[in-house]
Image (cartoon, coloured by chain):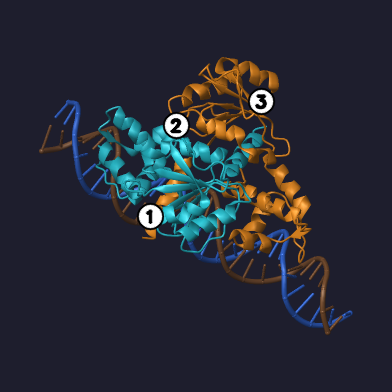
Chain colours: A cyan, B orange, C blue, D brown
Amino acid sequence: MKEQQRSGIPLPTIKRIPVYVSVLEKWLKEGKETVSTTDFAAALTLKPVQVRKDLAFAGAEGKPRIGYRTEELLETLHRFVGWNNLSEAVLVGAGALGTAILGYKGFDRFGLKIKAAFDIDESKCGATVHDKPVYPIRDLKQYVKKNGIIMGILTVSENGAQPAADALVEAGIQGIWNFSPAQIDVPDSIFVQQEDLAAGLAVLAVRIKERQ
Amino acid sequence: MKEQQRSGIPLPTIKRIPVYVSVLEKWLKEGKETVSTTDFAAALTLKPVQVRKDLAFAGAEGKPRIGYRTEELLETLHRFVGWNNLSEAVLVGAGALGTAILGYKGFDRFGLKIKAAFDIDESKCGATVHDKPVYPIRDLKQYVKKNGIIMGILTVSENGAQPAADALVEAGIQGIWNFSPAQIDVPDSIFVQQEDLAAGLAVLAVRIKERQ
DNA sequence: AATGAATCGATATATTTTTATCGGTTCGTC
DNA sequence: GACGAACCGATAAAAATATATCGATTCATT
C-alpha cells in the first residue's frame, strides 16, 4: 500500500495503461490501423473521456474523426511506462510463487527480463527453474552490480521478506516489486510496489457478499 | 479494471483491510492486547485518521486513549470481508500460475479453500497438484453444483480466458477472480475481480524512471 | 479530584479522480 | 464546397477519497 508518491501522473492512469496496451496489441494483430477512445471504451467498460485523458497523460496525440494510429499509440504507451528499455530484474525467493513468476511468459511483452533467481535454501541453488539459474543469496550483490540490474522481485515468505529486502537494497537495487504480504522497510530512495493478492480477494469477497 | 460497482464502502478501504489483518495477526501473536490507529499508522505509513475511517467502515469500535481490542478487531475485519465463511473456490487453468496459486499457503488464512482445479488439457487431469485434484473442464458444472461453490479463479492464458469464463458462468459461479490479462465478458450478475500483474509492473517502472 | 496526554468519533476541508460539456477539426456524403 | 457526424482537446463540474480539526472520553499521574 505504499502507493503515495505524487508526481503529476495519476496512479489509476498508470494502472490502466497495460490494459490499453493489451487491447492495442490485439487490434494491431487484427490489422486495425487506427483506434478511437470510443473503441477502447466499448472494449473495456470505460468512458471515452477517461481514455482520452489517460492517453493525453501518456503524451499520445490523435486526430478528430480518426482517432490514434494504432502502432504509434502502442509505441507511445510503451515508452511512457518505460517498457521499451526496462532493465533486467532479479527474483528473490524461488518458492511456489517465485517459480510461477519465473515461468510467466507474459512479462517479456512488457520488456521485463528476469535474469536469475536467488534463494537462501542452498539445496535449490545450482539448478535452473524455467531456464533461469538459481543462485545462493550471498551472491546477490555481486551479480546485481556486475549486470547493472535495477529491479528486484520479492517472492519470499512473510518472515523472509525484510532480510531479503535488505539484501536487495544492499546490492544496489532501485525498485522492489514485493509479492510477500509483509511490509518491508527500505530507504526513501527505493521504490516499493506492493503486490497484494489478498486485496483482490477482499474486494471479490465483499462484492459477492453484497449480492446475497 | 471492472472495479466500478459503487456501494457505500470505498474500494480503497476494502483493499487496505487485508493489510490491517496482516499486522493485527502479527500483533496478536506478540501478545498485544489493544491497538491504536497510531500504531497502524506507524507500521503502515498511513495517517491515523484514515485508519480510523477505514475501521469505522468495517464497523469496528474503539475507546479513546486505549484503541481497539486486538482480537475483537481482527474478528470484526474478518467478518467484514466475509472471510469467516467465504465459501470454497475452484480454479480453472492448471498451468504455471495456476499451480503457484494452488500451492500458495497464504490463502487459508483468509478462509479461501481451493477445492479443485480444472483444465482443458486432459493429460493433466487425474493427477493432483499440491494435493488438489485436477479434473477435465467438462466436469466443472457438475462439480460446482454438487459442492455449492460460488467462486472461480481463472488462471488460463489470454486465449482461453473467455471460454473458461463462459464455463464458470454456465456452472453457476457468482464471482470470478481473473488472473488472465484478457478482459472477459460475463453477465452483470457476476462480479469479476481483475488481477492485473502488469498494472503493478507499470507503476514500478514509471516510478523508477521518475527517479532517474 | 484535578490535570494532561492519548485517542476515538464526527464534522469540515482539501485533494484527487472521474465525468460532463463545449468548441474545433477531420472527413465522408450530398 | 456545404452539411453533418465522429472524435479529439481543453475546460468545467461532480464525485470520491484523503486529510485536518475539534470536542469528548479515558486513564495515568499528581
Q: Which mark is residue B182?
A: 2
The residue carrying mark 1 is A146
Looking at the picture, how far across and down is residue D25, in whole percent? 80, 66
User: Is A128 left, or right, of D20 in this rendering?
Assistant: left
Question: Circle 3 — which element?
Answer: loop
Amino acid beneath label 1: Lys
**Callout 2–callout 1 Cβ contact below 8 Å:** no
Amino acid beneath label 3: Ile
Please name whichever residue, A12 or C10, is drawn nearer the observer in this view of the structure: A12
Amino acid beneath label 2: Ala
**Disc 1 chain ID:** A
Residue beneath the point at 68% across and 38% down: B108
Looking at the picture, how far across and down is residue A98, in whole percent? 52, 41
Q: Which mark is residue A49?
A: none
Cα–Cα span, label 2 and label 1: 37 Å
**Disc 2 chain ID:** B
Residues at marks 2 and 1 on the same chain: no
Density class for disc 3 (Cα within 10 Å; few <14, some 14-19, many ≥20) is many
Q: Which mark is residue B149?
A: 3
Residue beneath the point at 69% across and 49% down: B58
Cα–Cα span, label 1 and label 3: 50 Å
From where the camera sits, is residue B91 visible?
A: yes
